[in-house]
Image (spheres, helix red, strand yellow):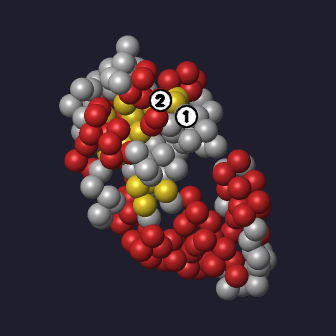
Amino acid sequence: MFDGIFWDNDGVLMETEHLYYQANAEALAQVGIELTLEDFCRISLRQGESVLSLADSNLDEAELRRVRDGIYFRLLGEESRVYTGVQETLHQLHGRLPMAIVTSCRRDNFLQMHRSSGLLGYFDFILTREDYVASKPDPEPYLTACARAGLAVAAIPGDMNRGGNFGTARWLLDGIHELPKLLKLD
């Protein structure tokens, strides 16, 4: 049925979205702005825009971004977690078909959160933000992965808030729990 599986990382394999919210909230708090979870979800997750735009236009956005990025990097090293069931599912799927991670995460952040995840050995390759020009929801990251793997079709477990608004969405799954049944492994 499928020739390969391309996994999203944040929100699918690794529980990190709350850390990105926390980093943005801490950075904005330093300039006197309170970021609610509701505003974060609306602006960042649904609209795909930066919540740093809430800051006064007279502030140096590059400096604010640097502060936020530093906080996020620290939090990834201290608090990122593998979602329950991921390790078991990857173990069950490993070696049956090619698997890769395709993420919009920057490589340094990706490696920071996976320092002790134990997951990277399950994947044939990993594409991070530096490996393509147009980020998700543009299809380029997944098309790049298909080309690298020599595949025409792939299952793409991803979160539906971002990353699934393109033509290959018919292959997008809502989570890892669907895979063993879909692939008739259970």
Dot 1, crowdedness within 10 Å: few (<14), some or many (≥20)? some
Q: Which residue is mark 2?
A: 178
Image location of residue 145, percent across then percent down: 36, 34
- C-alpha distance separating marks 1 and 2: 7 Å
Give the residue at x 50% y 37%: 175
The kind of secondary structure element at disc 1 is: loop
Q: From the viewer's perspective, is residue 144 above or below residue 24?
A: above
Q: Amino acid at mark 2?
A: Glu
Is label 1 or label 2 in front? 2
In the rendered image, the residue lying farthest to the top is 1
Whether residues under marks 1 and 2 lie with C-beta atoms below 8 angstroms apart, the answer is yes
Residue visible at 61% across and 71% down? 22
Count neighbours of disc 2 (C-alpha within 10 A) and say few if under 14, some if 14 to 19, many if 20 or more: few
146 or 182, nearer to the observer? 182
Horizontal side, residue 30 vs residue 170: left or right: right
Residue occupying the point 44% across, 52% down = 83
What is the quadrant of residue 108 in the picture?
Answer: bottom left
Q: Amino acid at mark 1?
A: Asp
Res. 5 image quadrant: top left
* Residue 186 image position (x, y, % from top left): 35, 24
Asked whether 165 or 175 is in front, the reply is: 175
Q: Which residue is mark 1?
A: 174
Please tell me whether mark 2 sits on a helix, a strand or a loop. helix
